[in-house]
Amino acid sequence: MIRPITLFPFPYETFEKLDMGKKVKGVLDCELSIPAQMIEDVKLALGRKANIKTCLRSGGEILSRAEIIEAAKAMCENK
């Protein structure tokens, strides 16, 4: 899990350390924003190396653990 404390400057180095393709099969970008605001930076940080999906919510509602788990499972099934 990468949970940035600040988004500027974006923590590209942290994403570059991920072992994409071997240990890390994909990245789930969870945001309390529609449309996603960080997805472009995440794509830039990972390049074309990763399967990147989003799990989004807005309107003051918090993502539940169940929603995040469901999105992660769906991502794993769709590879």
Image: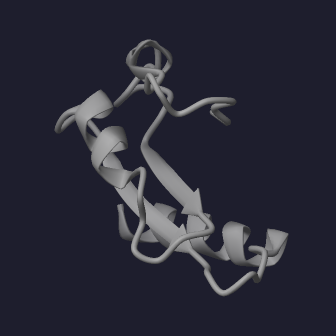
Residue at 27%, 43% (x, y): give it.
43
Image colouring: one colour
- When the figure is inspected, residue 38 is found, relative to residue 1, above or below; the finding is below
Residue 54 position within the rendered picture, expressed as x and y whole percent measured from the top left: 46, 65
Residue 57 position within the rendered picture, expressed as x and y whole percent measured from the top left: 61, 79
Residue at 42%, 50% (x, y): give it.
38
Residue at 43%, 41% (x, y): give it.
25
Image quarter of residue 19: top left
Residue 64 position within the rendered picture, expressed as x and y whole percent measured from the top left: 81, 75
- Judging depth in this view, the residue of 51 and 76 nearest the camera is 51
Report the side of 11 relative to 2 (left or right). Answer: left
Instruction: Look at the image and tell me in which quarter the C terminus lies.
Output: bottom left
Report the side of 63 relative to 59 (left or right). Answer: right
Residue at 28%, 49% (x, y): give it.
40
Image quarter of residue 59: bottom right
Instruction: Look at the image and tell me in which quarter the N terminus lies.
Output: top right
- When the figure is inspected, residue 63 is found, relative to residue 19, above or below; the finding is below
Report the side of 67 relative to 75 (left or right). Answer: right
Which residue in the rendered view is the most extreme toward the bottom? 59
Number of numbered tags placed on the structure image: 0
Residue 11 position within the rendered picture, expressed as x and y whole percent measured from the top left: 48, 21
- Judging depth in this view, the residue of 66 and 42 nearest the camera is 42
Which residue in the rendered view is the most extreme toward the front? 8
Image quarter of residue 55: bottom right
